[in-house]
Image (spheres, helix red, strand yellow):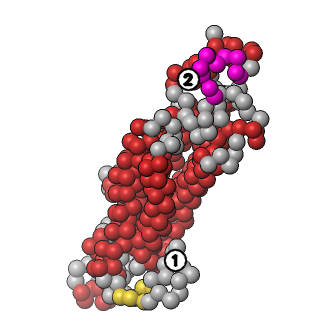
Amino acid sequence: KQWYQRRVRGPHPCLAPGDRPLKMGSYPTVDQIIQYGWPDEWLPFIIVGSAICIALIALDIFIFIKHKKYSTKFPIQFLCVFGILQVFPVYACMNLVAIIVPSASDFTVFMNESYEAITFILFMRLVFTYMGGKKIYKRHVKGDKIHLNLPPFCCFVCLPEISISHCFFVFCEALIAFYVVFCIVLGFVKLVMNMDGSDAYPSNAITSLFGNIYHAMLLVLLILAIYGLSGVYHSAEEALKHRGIVRKFLVYKIFTVLAKAEDVLFGSLGHHGIISDEDFGYNDYWSAGLRLRMIVFFAVIVQALIMFPLAIKFFDVEGYYVENKPATAEVQFTSVVVNGGVLSEDEPPADPEKIAIA
């Protein structure tokens, strides 16, 4: 009855005695959504967002079937590539859940950040696999020279040039590991603290301070993790150049960084009251800050629809599946006739004299 009155008489007549509209940055519970309903303009967002998620899931199933035939011969490549591509449907589905049930948005943000951090490990493993494995990769580049002004610190030209050693690999892997552990462990702590409060941004000073420190450290560790992954790639840049590593990394990293930036930016605008209800003329149960954050979640779903096909193209099966062989120069054989016999490319001779003749 109250939901019907809200649609007929306007927003506030449906509020029960003692009820007040949501404060800036507050999330309604499921019971409150059932009681007051979503805003009038919200149903199209839910319908369109659901259709996009269904399309992404269908496309994801198609990609799985397309790549599945390589999973036996190339299990590591299959796991890494398919795992990285899941960033787009995971982000889209989690943001759709946040739109339908705004009080679950803290959980969905935690899931997005945790999975995005895990993709760093998958991408690093994929780079090692392109070179024939981690041990072969390290033997191949050990002793080579590398400048430390790697992305995203390209402008620091004063950084020295060093020889690639075991310590350099440990340093790069540690930067990535710190970021993964931070996102999962401290992200879970932040989730528990936010769930313990009544609002998405609790008024408790300690919780708010922890949230600000968390986002600042998250940005710093993200930059350092990208630097560590750049070190792994640039150590063998010449051998990996034809694999399109850079565009594969950028296509999904731009998507995740943009989603984080939008969420933090517009969430902060609502939290600090920079955008108020009066700015938009809203006087119903849903605050302007909450509406704005929900629009950001919908924008991420649309971005996933746009960039997922592009990522599929960059991770095409014809371009990344390679044999696990050392990335060293090998003797190439062609079909030639030697003493009446044929030396084939598939079956190279074991006799060194025949190799020399060939």
Q: Position of residue 45 (x, y in %)?
A: 65, 33
Work out whether residue 230 or residue 348 is closer to the camera in this orientation and state it. 230
Q: Quadrant of the N terminus?
A: top right
Residue shown at 74% from the left, 20% from the top: 10
In front here: 78 or 87? Answer: 87
Helix or strand or loop: what does disc 2 sit on? helix
Residue at the spot 35% in from the left edge and 88% down from the top edge: 163
Q: Residue at x 44, y 53 (%)?
A: 210
**Quarter of the image that includes the C terminus:** bottom left
User: Of callouts 2 and 1, which one flags the residue occurring earlier in the amino acid sequence?
Assistant: 2
Q: Mark 2 belongs to which amino acid?
A: Gln
Magenta region: 11-21
In percent of width and height, residue 140 lies at 32, 80
**Would residue 237 be visible to someone looking at this image?**
yes
Check disc 1: other Cα within 10 Å, few if <14, some if 14-19, many if 20+: some
Looking at the image, residue 107 sits to the left or right of residue 133; the answer is right
- Look at the numbered disc 1 and give the secondary structure of its residue: loop
Q: Is residue 16 magenta?
A: yes
Farthest residue, direction top: 1
Q: Is residue 66 above or below residue 50?
A: below
Mark linked to residue 153: 1
Q: Residues within 10 Å of mark 2 (few under 14, many from 20)?
A: few
Q: Is residue 287 left or right of residue 158?
A: right
1 shown above or below 172: above
Q: Which residue is mark 2?
A: 32
Secondary structure mainly formed by the magenta segment: loop
161 drawn magenta: no
